[in-house]
Amino acid sequence: MYYNVHDIAERYGVARHTIWRWVKDDFLPRPYMFGPGAARWSEEDLRAFDAECATVAPKNEWTPSSPQVD
C-alpha cells in the first residue's frame, strides 16, 4: 500500500511541510514518484522508518527526575 503526503502528515501528527523538510533533511525516506505531484511512500518504508526511530533515544529529553534550570 502507498500513502500520500496528507496521510503521512496525519500518521505522524505534523504538517505537510514538515514531512517535506524531513525528506530534504534525509530523516524520512524519499517517496516514490508516480508522476508530477504524485509522491507516495510505501508501507514497508514507513514500517522500517518507525522501527528505526523506536530504537533512537530522543536528545535532551526532560524527565521528572531531571533538574530544572530557572
Image (tube, rainbow, N blue to C red):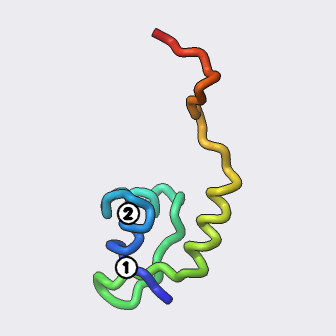
Residue 11 drawn at (x, y percent): 43, 67
Amino acid at circle 2:
Trp
Assign a secondary structure to mark 1. loop
Q: Residues within 10 Å of mark 2 (few under 14, many from 20)?
A: some
38 to 64, vertically: above or below = below
Assign a secondary structure to mark 2. helix
Give residue 4's quadrant in the image.
Answer: bottom left
Give residue 37's quadrant in the image.
Answer: bottom left
Work out whether mark 1 precedes mark 2 in sequence or the reverse, and give the earlier one.
Answer: 1
Q: Which residue is drawn at 53% across and 58% down?
A: 27
**Which is more toward the observer, 53 or 11?**
11
27 to 69, vertically: above or below = below
Residue 12 drawn at (x, y percent): 44, 62
Amino acid at circle 1:
Asn
9 relative position to 29: left or right: left
What is the count of numbered marks? 2
* Residue bearing the label numbered 2: 20
* Residue bearing the label numbered 1: 4
15 to 8, vertically: above or below = above
45 relative position to 33: left or right: right
Q: Which residue is drawn at 53% across and 69% down?
A: 29
Circle number at residue 19: none
Name, please, the residue furthest toward the top.
Answer: 70
Q: How crowded is mark 1: few (under 14 residues within 10 Å), some or many (20 or more)?
A: some
12 relative position to 60: left or right: left
Q: Residue at x 60, y 42 (%)?
A: 58
Residue 48 drawn at (x, y percent): 64, 71
40 to 60, vertically: above or below = below
Residue 15 drawn at (x, y percent): 31, 59
Q: Residue at x 66, y 44 (%)?
A: 57
Give the quarter of the figure containing the C terminus.
top left
- Whether the residues at callouts 1 and 2 have beta carbons within 8 Å, the answer is no
